Image (cartoon, rainbow, N blue to C red):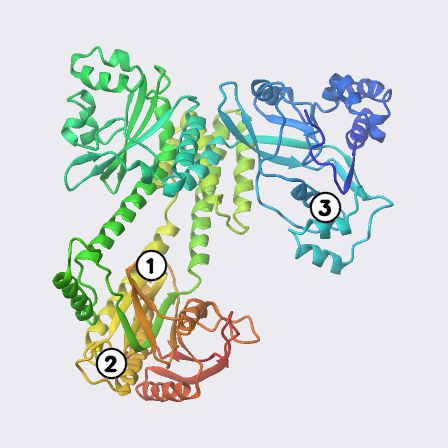
Amino acid sequence: MNYNLFEDSPLKNVISFDQLIESLEKTALSDNDYLSLQAKALLQDINKIPELKTGIEDLNLITKNENLLSNLLSNLFPNALSDNEIKAVTIPFHNIIFNFTNRFQRILDDAGGTFDLTIRDFDKDQFFVMSCILVLNAYYKKDFIISKPLFYDIPDKNGITKHYRILYNADFIKISPTEKAIELSPEDIDLLMDNYDDVNVWKEKFPLESWEMKGFGIVTLFDATIESAISELKTNLLRANSEHNEKDRKFESIFRSIFKVPDLRVGLTFYNEEENMFINPPHATTGTNSFILYEKKELPCENAFLDCEINAILKTNKTYAISNVEKFAKTAKNEKFAKHLLKQNIKSCILAPVIKNDKLLGILELVSSNPRSLNSINAINLDLLLPYVVDTLDNYYNDLQNQIEAVIQREYTAIHSSVFWKFKKEAQKFYHTYNPNKDYIFKEIVFKDVYPLYGQIDVKSSSLHRNQTVKDDLKSQLKTLLKIFDKLKENTNLSILEQRKFEMHSYFEDLDLELKTDTEQQIQNYIQNEIHPIIVKSKVDEATEKTIKKYFTDIDPKTGSYYKSRKKFDDAMAIVNKKMASILDKSQVEAQKIFPHYFERFKSDGVEHNLYIGASISPQEPFDKIYLSNLRLWQLQTLCEMELEHHRCKSILPYELEVTSLILVFSSPISIRFRMDEKRFDVDGTYNARYEVVKKRIDKAHIKGTNERITDQEKITIVYSQRNEEKEYLKYIKFLQFKNILEPTIEQFDVEELQGVSGLKAIRIKVLNTNGL
């Protein structure tokens, strides 16, 4: 094993067991005769090797005294847990590892004698900086927490790579400066904080071996193969076309690592509901083929299984496993389909319907060339993976639908009525001039000198709310599980219960920190893999059984997790979006009567809209800027109405949400062009692009010189840049104040400079929420 993966280090490592030996010396003086005699006997052997306390430089000393060290470390490495825990003594971030538990040693033996333990994606610069952070935390009492998990990727005896998460315990390590150490000032530490990626800065403040790390660490590995595989699955399913060959390998390796089947292959069969057909997915898009259809592009569903008993899969929507295809073929009814599989060297397989909202999306196929490798027992592993396959296929169908709609839009669709005439004119030109021997180049649709209006009503802090509801649900689930484990402890003497309770408490405390992208999935996988099996297999009394039954009833069957707070948030978001969009759509019908204009709206965490008005939109009607003023007043009134509606409906929302409103004023006429490649309107020209830049960045902007956002709840923020725009909107505000729609107080301030944009100002006014409205 290569002990020194990285030559440069700010730490001089000295392996010492002085803290353990001091504890042993105290035990030797205790009143407990048994422990005292045991400690004295062990100390006799330890005292013969003073380096164990003063510091070991020759690693051969460790090899020669393995049994003695094992006895010294016995309290930290209980023999009863040696076959279960993956644990050893180490120096953090190094390959100096010894005193392996039995399970750890078996893992290394299966990997092969020449296998080197190398931390995944961990280079010499990361090693140096992480070592420095150890010093900052231990000596300077800082609290720099790096949550990026570290992994070992270790192959088993079958060549399947398993993924182990690394956890270090540094309780027995002391860090102290050597004569080379540089005393760091607060300014030095601030400099380091701002330069994590610049290793030269760290090397300047931490010369080589300028600090001594004395003692030993403990490394514990957790088998995170499933979690790691699922994470890989989320990023690899249905990758970009150019990457499908690599995706094939990754996709199958993920399933192989979970099912522990080295030759496992994965296939997909798509389902077309309208025609009741099975379809072989386009390999260039998905990177997978269908084993059910084999070389056929599509088949009616009733013909796909050649009349064998698997036809029932279409009615029951249940997973079907064939552990031995050759045996399956001996039944006359199944012979044809079995031969169809054997022709593809499939000796065992699992066919799993992919269902969403009670609709069949397709069938996931797992196959192996070995009989019994896949069966109804290991098919249970699909419960962890199917939700991601479901979402992936659903996304694929949505993307496919978008592509189909793009084709329809290209050839047939009726777009917004205000601009339909121009598209129709171009289509007529194509029809009258079309020559099959010549390529026709469609002319881009451009509307010049139009005035843009942009507005939005946005749910305030939606991401924070969403993360908080995830935390609330996870905390609620963990609380319930901890109560159940308290009951289990009364009925059983399983020592593992305390360990699992400790782990759940740790996860519970982690939820008080910032939510990371994989936290939810990590906790859910832990609960499903480590906690649920204990609950299901435990013998309990009647009262506890009722508690457990209620717990499983409260779990969402689709996600396998609590879905209470999140459901309230999602439902509230849906209600807000629906009501806001409804008001805007209804009001827009009247607005079109002012002057025909282009209108589009979008729903995300709120509702935003774009309007463009000008003579080129409707050249048959004379245009006057009074129509622009009228539309601006309409927009402001409509946002007031949306704010008021939100205020009225807050009491019925299942989750409290606040909204902020924004209007962007832009008085210079611009040109918009229909992008043929994107099938949407966009601003045309570099100068006009400034409008789009402001529109994309303004809602996150702050009041100049402060950390306060320019938007605020129950208030409408109007952003502008010209003095005449200010005068115009102050007139509108005065009018709406007269109508008791807006409050008397008007806030005016400068907006912070955005990238490439400066000189913006804003007016902010609160909507008057009165019972009379």
Q: CA distance from mark 2 to mark 1?
A: 41 Å
**Residue drawn at (30%, 68%), measured in percent from left and top?**
673
Please say if 769 is above or below 23: below
Relative image position of residue 304 (x, y in whole percent) = 18, 27
Q: Residue at x 21, y 67 (%)?
A: 416
Residue 607, compared with residue 103, is above or below; it is below
In the picture, which quadrant includes the C terminus?
A: bottom left
Residue placed under numbered mark 3 in the picture: 132
Rendering coords of residue 159 (x, y %): 50, 21
Location of mark 2 (residue): 615
Residue 610, x across and y down, in percent: 31, 70
- The reply to whether the C-beta atoms of the residues labelled 3 and 2 are less than 8 Å apart is no
Please tell me whether mark 2 or mark 1 is closer to you in this view: 2
Q: Secondary structure at mark 1?
A: helix
Q: In the image, 729: left or right of 145?
A: left
Name the residue type under label 1: Ala
What is the three-letter code of the residue carrying label 3? Answer: Cys
How far apart are the two marked residues, 3 and 1, measured between alpha carbons?
47 Å
- The type of residue carrying mark 2 is Ala
Label 1 neighbour load within 10 Å: few <14, some 14-19, many 20+: many
Q: CA distance from mark 3 to mark 2?
A: 66 Å
Between discs 3 and 1, the one toward the N terminus: 3
Q: Nearer the viewer, mark 3 or mark 2?
A: 2
772 relative to 180 in the view: left or right: left
Of pointers 2 and 1, the one earlier in the residue sequence: 1
| Res 445 quadrant in image | bottom left
Between label 3 and label 1, give the one nearer the viewer.
Answer: 3
Q: Position of residue 136 (x, y in %)?
A: 73, 49
* Secondary-structure class at tag 3: helix
